[in-house]
Image (spheres, rainbow, N blue to C red):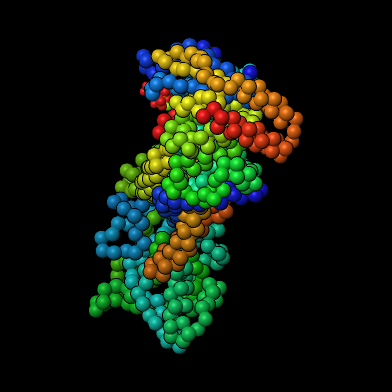
Amino acid sequence: MKGFLYKLFFYFKHDSVNILRSFVSGLGILFLIAFFVMYLAVKSAVLSYISGSLLDNLASDEIKILPKNAKAVEYVKREGSPGISQELYSKIKSMPDFKATSTISRTPFSIRLKGEILGKSRSTFVPVCGVDRNLIKDKVPRWQSFYNKKPVPIIVPKFTIDLMNNYMSSMENLPPLSEKDFIGFPVELKFHAGKRNTPFYKEYFFDGEVHSFTDLLNFPGVIVPTDFLAEVTAQYRRETGGQAALDYAVVYARVKDPDKLPVIVSNLKSMGLKVESQKDIAEKTQKTMGLINEVFFAIMAVFLVVSIISIFNSYLAIVYIRSERFSLQRILGFPKISILSAFILESAVVGAVYGAGGYFIGNYLLSHGGEILSKWVPMLSAVHLETAGADILFCSVLFASAVCVIAAAIPGIFASNINLFKAVRK
Amino acid sequence: MLLSVENVSLFFGKRKILDNVSLKISEGEIVAITGKSGSGKTSLLGIMSGLLDPDEGVVYYKGENIIKWWDFKKSRYRNKEIGFVFQFFNLLPDLSAYENIVYPSLVKFFPTDLKGEVRELSKILGIEHILYQKPETLSGGERQRVAIARAIINRPKILLADEPTGNLDTGTALEIKNLFLRLRDEFNMSLIIVTHDEPLIEIADRHYHLEDGILTEKIIKRPQRENKTKRTASVKKTKSLDKKAQAKAGSKSSASRKTADKKIK
Ligand SMILES: Nc1ncnc2c1ncn2[C@@H]1O[C@H](COP(=O)(O)OP(=O)(O)OP(=O)(O)O)[C@@H](O)[C@H]1O
Ligand SMILES: [Mg+2]
């Protein structure tokens, strides 16, 4: 034991500079692992965001029908924005190929939401779209009670909880309320229908209440039942004789026979519509993921190559600086294995330290960076960056060690095969 | 027979350095090798220590062909069975004398603690006072003795010495010579010494000369024949004794040799 301790002491006394050198040369591994940990988090966050998104998650027998020329779903009707008219929707609905259809609808009116917080009432224009109940089935809590009734149920994006809490704490220093506390919160909807300063202008007031919160909508506005919007539109037409019609941003349709999909799609296309199926969505998702992968892999590949070269270089320098010593070691009876294993052991330790270090740095950035990010951009709070677990720590340590060992092995082999007679003749 | 070199030839490129060389050494024997610079003496030592493979011929150690050994066994052989004293000392400059001496013992994963061993050896070699100095602060003779201590720390059976007195003055060379005699007498070591020093050749049992790759035995000019019989007797005696007694007996016999040497002069 005493001899072993002496050996350790000996090693640290005479190789500390080399150990330090290896540590400096392997620094890239630290970033590599940190990046890797973050990559995993971003990847899983994006995947779960996409797959969890209410409107993009299609079943295999489901298709998404968009108006012609639509680049993305436009939840709010603007001048000239493409939409599916009611007649067209009736046509689709009456096609014999579909089991069921549901829609995301848009009203031609602008709407103000008015709420009272802490005795002060506030009123703002808010984007509103209509949704059929069966579209949110099982995806939103208490979806059954989402239908056209009084007071009107309203689904609100989750980040508004933070906005409201923020507001209240800045005004009255109140403790934050939970999601549950906000449910049933009364809201007044004010419709501005028709052109102002014309006989066709009319205002409607309705009582509403917060039905639930969700992140599933990729949309910074609120959702109400489609039937409600249709009812208001019809009432306006009846009362003023003005022209106003609900239209649809998307129609989701469930196909009776998925084998007939190609035919159905071409039929819909001939009607001037755009169709996306699960396959298209999968392709889109894959494209996004591919981009993320490419960026991360490019960065990691650069780190990897740089680290390997730098570790390799540093160990090679050690071989040349120490060539006399290695040669003498061999003459004094150190086997090749012992010289090689010294390289391997040392580099494995360096790698393990950096693997663990990189893991913790990556996790630190994830937990703190995520917080900061969601403060700046509330909508991104929906993207949840999860820190890596113990299995990833294990993988990081293993991977970093392996990289360092691979980089150090070749110089180690050089060192162990050094010319035996060099020291004799010197 | 401890070590036997049989019909060994060595080429460097097309140059034949060693031509059908044969050499045998038994336990407790001293062999001297002379030869011009570049005649291949160091190369021959290299072959005997398994550092260099000959192009032809074999080397037997205790009946085993060392050329066929794997690296691991060859390394063990170099570490345990032989000691190598180099022409130019070859101490590691950043290690102290003590660290240089124990260096070969660090081969083992769990090395034995050699503090006592080093103390004992350095007493014999007269280097106790310089153990914690770096080689650069040591004199040539001190360096050579540190190198010898390193070579014999693992108690090898054979010591290979390549011009051990080549860089030393006659006084220090004499000390080294006496040391070699003690090594043989106290540890029953065999010594193969490459040298041009007359006094070192005189203590040898056999003397070989290397020229044009050919090794030939030479007659040693030795005024007193009885030296040899005396030594063999002392070896026989010490073999039966324990280590400490052995050391005592050895120092006596070497002391007697010292006086004998003086007489020669
Ligand atoms: N690797 C090599 N390649 C080519 N020639 C070599 C090599 N090593 C040694 N030699 C040659 O072999 C010859 C013998 O070398 P060696 O070192 O054995 O001589 P030596 O008898 O020990 O000489 P010295 O007394 O000067 O130490 C020399 O002429 C040397 O140039
Ligand atoms: Mg030589």
Q: Position of residue A392 (x, y in %)?
A: 53, 51
Q: Is residue B227 visible?
A: yes
Q: Is residue B59 left or right of residue A54?
A: right
Residue at image point 54% right, 74% down:
A178
Q: Nearer the viewer, residue A160 or A402?
A: A402
Residue at image point 44% right, 41% down:
B140
**Residue occupying the far left of the picture:** A197
Q: How many numbered marks have been drawn onto this rendered protein structure? A: 0
| Quadrant where the C terminus of chain A is found in the figure | top left
Q: Is residue A7 left or right of residue A244?
A: right
Q: Nearer the viewer, residue A137 or B229?
A: B229
Residue at image point 36% right, 56% down:
A73
Q: Is residue A134 left or right of residue B241?
A: left
Q: Nearer the viewer, residue B241 or A221?
A: B241
Q: Position of residue A299 (x, y in %)?
A: 37, 49
Q: Nearer the viewer, residue A74 or B104?
A: B104
Q: Position of residue A112 (x, y in %)?
A: 37, 76
Q: Is residue B106 above or below residue B53?
A: below
Residue at image point 43% right, 46% down:
B136
Q: Is residue A395 visible?
A: no
Q: Is residue B17 above or below residue A64?
A: above
Q: Quadrant of residue A42?
A: bottom left
Q: Is residue B224 above or below residue A161?
A: above
Which quadrant of the frame does ligand 2 lie within? top left
Q: Position of residue B10 (x, y in %)?
A: 44, 16
